[in-house]
Amino acid sequence: MTNVVVVGGQWGDEGKGKVVDLLCPAFAEVVRFNGGNNAGHTVKFADRHFALHLIPSGILQPGCRCLIGPGVVIDPVALLEEIRMLEDQAVSVRPRLLVSPRAHIVLPGHRALDVARETASGAAKLGTTGRGIGPAYEGRARRTGVRLGLARNPRRLREAVAAASAELEQAIARCPGAVAPSADEIERTVEAAAAIAPMLGDVSRALADSDAAGRPILFEGAQGTLLDVDHGTYPFVTSSGCLAGYAAPACGLPARVIGGVLGVFKAYTTRVGSGPFPTELFDGTGEQLRRRGNEFGTTTGRPRRTGWFDAVAARAAVRWSGIDAVALTKLDVLDELAEIRVATSYQVGGQTTPEFPDDAEEVGAASPVYETLPGWQADSSAVTTAEKLPDVARRYVERLEELLGVPVAVISTGPRREETIVRRVQPFAGWNVAP
Ligand code: IMP
């Protein structure tokens, strides 16, 4: 059985939570390897609804062990709240959660600095989630960060948090009108980190042992490939690696442990925050996608920007993340449309190109070259077999496969676990994943 990485192929919010939740029964371990509580995964089954930000969606499958790797930045207060939310709903968490001591803590000062910088930037803001993710990764790179492992030694933790908070306070003071966090707020973070200490353990060792014993690992990506700090639309990106290949080294494992990559894409495109989005719609169709797709952020509640499927950007994501097969989500959101467009290339500076430019300004200036496909104007919601899909909807899926050069293995036709079509296409079928 192969170890599989699940990543978003667009700008986040592709529906990775549902896909991971579906695949979990086939995996012994599910590990988060990047980002922090800027991510938001929604999982719905029966009449229950869970919004997860740090804990892998695998926690909802009783047989799975869940891990949070060294490449994740953790706000201890947020993690503890999530643990309690799950425990309140009778989900067992503490005995099944292993957190890396190497993961960095998001301090209240990181959050305050994130918000202060965004406010000071006015119209030029990045549109971050305001969760302190950028400043926490910055602290890690500056080597002034605080790692969660210090929670095993309260004296060292307090000293490190005090030193980092003092440095952050100076940075916050340089932003007009910004207020540094109170001593109480900082103390709450220290206490939450101490409460997490019993869950700390060596994630690399645990996963390497699992791999050696043939227990399959599911690596759960956060954000999306186009938000990757190196390859995305810089500077309108997050601060960590979002490509699938990052999963292994971020967890202290060799690249060869990755056996397959499932890329999750919406049947259209959305983006939250600032940054270029060539296929964005500003008309009634865009509004219709937002309304039908309930396109409002899980983490911040912000309305998402909406647009057509962008095969230029998606092809780049397929290459960067080495996507072997696609999970296509929210197909039913397109049900009412008379016609559907897909960008197949860009016009940049008078030239037509199939490539995604490396410069965000160039992406912003690109005009998409569209192919127009007929809409199916029939109900595809809750369809569970490919044969029951309207013919025209099936052709849309097949056209995306041609444009991306990889098969669509999973089609989601609604938010619930049951509302899913699984196609036994290679290489997905060969991974022995049984949703
Ligand atoms: P940050 O990660 O909070 O610093 O935000 C940087 C950019 O990434 C902003 O445009 C955010 O909206 C975007 N972003 C971060 N996390 C997610 C996510 O999970 N889904 C969608 N967008 C995200």
Image (cartoon, grey):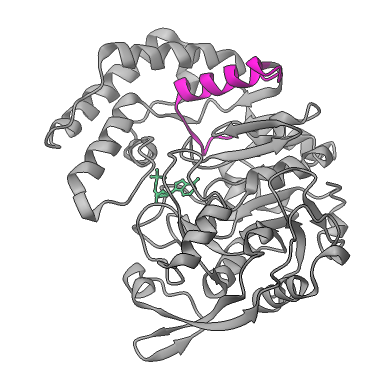
Q: Does the magenta run of residues contain 395?
A: no
What residue is at 66 percent from the left and 38 percent from the top? 43
Q: Residue furthest top?
A: 155
Quarter occupied by residue 91: top right
Residue 39 in picture, x, y percent from top left: 51, 41
What residue is at 36 percent from the left and 45 percent from the top? 128
Quarter occupied by residue 244: bottom right
Position above or below: 153 against 103: above
135 relative position to 432: left or right: left
Instruction: Compare residues 416 and 241 and report the one nearer the observer.
Output: 416
Residue 435 in picture, x, y percent from top left: 83, 46
Q: Which residues are magenta?
A: 69-94
Residue 25 in picture, x, y percent from top left: 82, 38
The image shows a total of numbered marks equal to 0
What residue is at 59 percent from the left and 72 percent from the top? 315
Is residue 394 among what the camera can see?
yes
What residue is at 58 percent from the left and 60 percent from the top? 9
Q: Does the magenta run of residues contain 87?
A: yes
